[in-house]
Amino acid sequence: MPMSTPRLKIINFYRFMRLDGDGSLAELRDELRAAMTDLEVKGTILLANEGINASISGLPHKVDQFIAYAAERLDCEFDVKESFHDETPFDRTEVRIKPEIVTFKRGVDVTISEGTHVGPTEWNELISDPDVIVLDTRNDYEVAAGRFPTAIDPKVEKFSDMPDFVESELSAYKDKKIAIYCTGGIRCEKFAPYLLEQGFREVYQLEGGILRYLESVPKEDSLWEGECFVFDRRISVDSELKRGNAADASQKKSS
């Protein structure tokens, strides 16, 4: 008997863009929450003056309707990473206003890293160069689920600890090529310009992160080992973006 097709779409997207102050953010929050509720879409959306970051799920056609609505409301397009599962990985519908859409605790100009993105198909060649320093920008419990084997594990508990790692362990390599990656790309959007601001000359980031890499690169060509930790009930996804088997080692640590 053939397996039934998973019926729920799970998507992740973000967009760095200037959103107006608290009053306008509150209005946008209420509108997005109402649309999610009407379309029975669950998950979390973070709003800040610097942009939007979302992880949501629902019936495919309703998720598509929500994306179309949000894109029209914000007058932009979203680079969406998607996967499917037979049950929702989220318990609730949340739209929250935060100081940052990904917590780094340092102001950076994300526009200065334009041109540093490397597509999934070019990524293998880049990180196979022995002169390139490959750096995982994720938390320690995420790295435990899977990684690119040549990557340095900074062993940090949260993303905002990465500058301390750079200062203590990486500052001597500013003339080297640095290749960085994260789950969906958003952390690298802040970390790449930060490295450039610190004087690193050549910085490259995996466009779309691990999720886009697994989506785009055939399994037989993939250099990824293990599974990819995700921040929802699935805990991890495998090389086919299906629910994985990794244990939850996060212990409720903050990202």
Image (cartoon, helix red, strand yellow):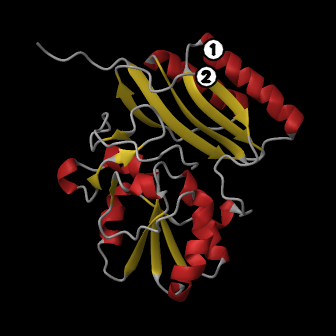
SS at badge 2: strand
Residue shown at the point (67%, 61%) measured from the top left: 111
Residue located at (32% from left, 34% from top): 243
Residue 223, picture quadrant: bottom left
Q: In the rendered view, does 150 fall on the left or right side of 22?
A: left
Question: Amino acid type of disc 1?
Answer: Thr
Pointer 1 with pointer 2, Cβ within 8 A: yes
Q: CA distance from mark 1 to mark 2?
A: 7 Å
Q: Is residue 200 visible?
A: no
Quick one: label 1 or label 2, which is nearer the N terminus?
1
Q: Which mark is in front, 1 or 2?
A: 2
Residue farthest to the left, as pictured: 1
Asked where in the image residue 53 lies, by quadrant, the reply is top right
Quadrant of the frame with the N terminus: top left
Q: Is 227 situated left or right of 103 in this image?
A: left
Q: Nearer the viewer, residue 146 or 83?
A: 146
Whether residue 155 is visible here, answered yes or no, is yes
Image location of residue 255, percent across then percent down: 57, 50
Residue beneath disc 1: 37
Q: Please report the residue visible at 44 percent of the width from the left and 21 percent of the height from the top.
A: 88
Residue at x 39%, y 78% (from the top left corner): 132
Taking the image as shown, residue 56 lies to the left or right of residue 103, namely left
- Residue type at tag 2: Thr
State the count of labels. Answer: 2
The disc at residue 128 is: none
Dot 1 falls on a residue whose secondary structure is: helix
Horizontal and vertical percent for residue 78? 57, 38
Q: Residue furthest front?
A: 251
The residue that label 2 is drawn on is: 93
Q: Residues within 10 Å of mark 2 (few under 14, many from 20)?
A: some
| Residue 159, above or below 89 | below
